[in-house]
Amino acid sequence: MPLFTIETTYHLPIHRQRNYEAETLDQACDLAIADEDWDDKKSDVETSGDTCVTGVWEGRDAAYIGRPLPIPSRFGEQVQRKADHFELLLGLLKILAHDPEGGSADVELWRRRANAAIAKAEAILAGENDPIEAS
């Protein structure tokens, strides 16, 4: 039976609470973001992210030694999958929104692309592999 080395990760939120004196809320937020002192940081274990697969190799203790194997998309970080797909959806909307008055010469092409984007979005929300990766 094959043996795999699997690397998994989860994101652990780190937070701090500080007071900032500023003229406006925007300025206070700018100060907080620019503040690089994290000596009083606290780990927020209660709201850590879901575990996701970040590396796969065939064999025992093969991490970063052997050739990495492709990770099925459903095991990737959900937030990143959504962010990556957002860019594709925005591109489709831009094309459709800027279509000339007469309409696209290839409406079916754009309909197929939109349907594929919808199917992928539904797979992401369901925690499944991308439709083209389904096996």
Image: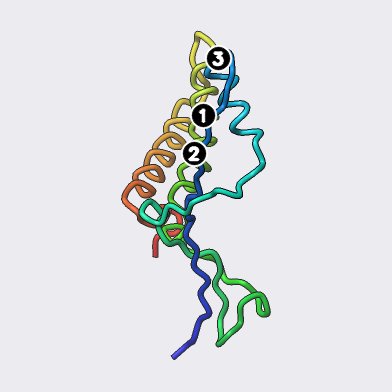
Q: Give how far apart the Cα atoms at labels 3 and 1 are.
A: 32 Å
Quarter assignment of residue 121: top left
Point 61% across, 72% down: residue: 68
Q: Residue 17 carries which label?
A: 2
Element marked by disc 1? helix
According to the image, label 3 marks what residue? 24
Residue 90, label in figure: 1
Q: What amino acid is at disc 2?
A: Gln
Percent across and percent down for residue 92 are: 51, 29
Q: In this view, does 96 lie above or below 108?
A: above
Q: In this view, does 21 lie above or below 2?
A: above
- Give residue 73's mark: none
* Residue at horizontal 68 percent and vertical 79 percent from the top: 65
Q: x, y (%) of residue 21?
A: 58, 22
Q: Nearer the viewer, mark 3 or mark 1?
A: 3
* First in sequence: mark 2 vs mark 1: 2
Secondary-structure class at tag 2: loop
